[in-house]
Image (cartoon, rainbow, N blue to C red):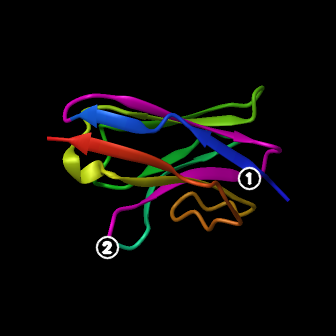
Amino acid sequence: QVQLVESGGGLVQAGGSLRLSCAASRRTVTMGWLRQAPGKEREFVAAISWSSGSTSYADSVKGRFTISRDNAKNTVYLQMNSLKPEDTAVYYCAASWGYNIWPIVPNYWGQGTQVTVSS
């Protein structure tokens, strides 16, 4: 079993930045972030390989979001810049034993953290 603890959500104005963190109790193969807005399906945001650091991003966040990892801390980050109101959602950290980073197939989920972007 892998426990994931997220932090860093909040309220920010459009154009602002937030950084999400996800601390894992142990490393798997890949980690990622997904989000779910009210009334919408959960969607992939970004993923990263623990070993190689290879990354993938949804088209809607490319150039604005950056996923990174700190192997020493078993922690993955999502730096979100130039935030838009449409980025408002609950963001979930996910861990996978699979090697695919597009798409990531989660085996474990965090509890979710709310990100709200005001216009």
Q: Residues within 10 Å of mark 2 (few under 14, many from 20)?
A: few
Q: What residue is drawn where x is 67% and y is 52%?
A: 30
Find out whether residue 24 is within the magenta segment: yes
Q: Is residue 73 left or right of residue 62?
A: right
Q: Is residue 94 left or right of residue 88?
A: right
Q: Secondary structure at mark 1?
A: loop
**What residue span does the magenta drawing correspond to?**
14-39
Three-letter code for the amino acid on which mark 1 is drawn: Val
| Residue denoted by label 1 | 29
Q: In terms of sequence position, does the residue under pointer 1 or pointer 2 come before the other?
A: 1
Quarter where residue 18 is shown: top left
Q: What residue is drawn where x is 40% and y is 37%?
A: 10
For the question of whether residue 51 can be seen, the reply is: no
Q: Position of residue 52 (x, y in %)?
A: 67, 40
Three-letter code for the amino acid on which mark 2 is drawn: Gly
Front in this rendered view, residue 50 or 41: 41
Q: Position of residue 81 (x, y in %)?
A: 31, 31
Q: Secondary structure at mark 2?
A: loop
Q: Position of residue 66 (x, y in %)?
A: 43, 36
Q: Is residue 109 above or below residue 23?
A: below
Find out whether residue 36 is within the magenta segment: yes
Quarter where residue 90 is shown: bottom left
| Residue denoted by label 2 | 39
Q: Is residue 15 above or below residue 115?
A: above
